[in-house]
Amino acid sequence: MKRNPGNRVAALLAGTVLAGAFSEASAIAVIDLGAVPRTGVFTSGIVPQYAWDGWNGITPNLGWAHNSKWYTFTLARTATVQITMTSSVNRMKPAFSVWRTSGTFVGGNHLSHAYNQVGLSGSSDFLKPQSQGGDGATQFMGYVNGGTNFTNGDNKRVLAGTGNMSRRATRYAAFARTLSAGQYLIAAGGSCNAQNCGNPSSHDFKLNVQYLPLAGSGKSP
């Protein structure tokens, strides 16, 4: 995919220096949402509209680790859950990936700039436990991509999402799967691949982790 050099990011974004530090890996920041109660977990944040697909001229077509939002959550029992991400504006297409962890995930132990949105291999190797019995991701569970389809930097096709488990619409991306008890990791961001994203702007989003069926709606991918 042809890149526009004018879109290479060399500026401050939300108070964080994005350029000039790419020669050294650094840790990802992870927010622990804790155990999911019966009523679900609801959170919100701000994320760049290219963070999940890496449309930044530096890590082409891979998730940009330091600008994606990372979360962990825990299930006390096997359950079918739906993870839903919605954005505040049409230009940001919500997207996220989900992994299972070894039972704990410490962002400070995992150093990289990019990740493979559709697996636990290639650029996602840094998510795995870095020592025997250590913390980290152990299994890829699935993804949903609210943006256009593309081939990522690990030469993997990134489509609408994991078959029969995902759904995308305007400003909406959802993934549902039956998960066993344990901890899970989410990487969330915007997906504007093959679009002109304009300025490297960030937008509001909401992220929900709920048990199915959803109360009062029954909505699921």
Image (cartoon, helix red, strand yellow):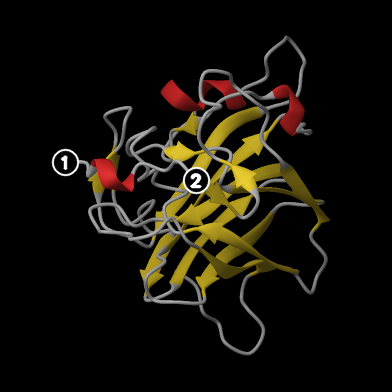
Please state if 194 lies on the left or on the right of 119 as rendered: left
Which of the 4 image quarters holds residue 117?
A: top left
Q: Is residue 170 positioned above or below 31 on the image?
A: below
Residue holding disc 2:
11
Which residue sits furthest left? 2
Q: Residues within 10 Å of mark 1 (few under 14, many from 20)?
A: few
Q: Tell me the mark number nearer the camera, choosing from 2 and 1.
A: 2
Q: Which numbered circle lies on residue 2?
A: 1
The residue drawn where x is 39% and y is 33% is 59
Q: Going from the N terminus, do you reach mark 2 or mark 1 first?
A: 1
Q: Determine the residue positioned at 52% across, 36% down.
A: 140
20 vs 174: above or below: above
For the residue marked with disc 1, what is the amino acid? Lys
In the rendered image, residue 98, in percent from the top left (x then y), is placed at 56, 46
**Residue at 31% from the left image edge and 30% from the top image edge:** 153
Q: Secondary structure at mark 1?
A: loop
Alpha carbon separation for disc pair 2 and 1: 22 Å
Residue 116 seen in the figure: yes
Q: Residue at x 33, y 39 (%)?
A: 61
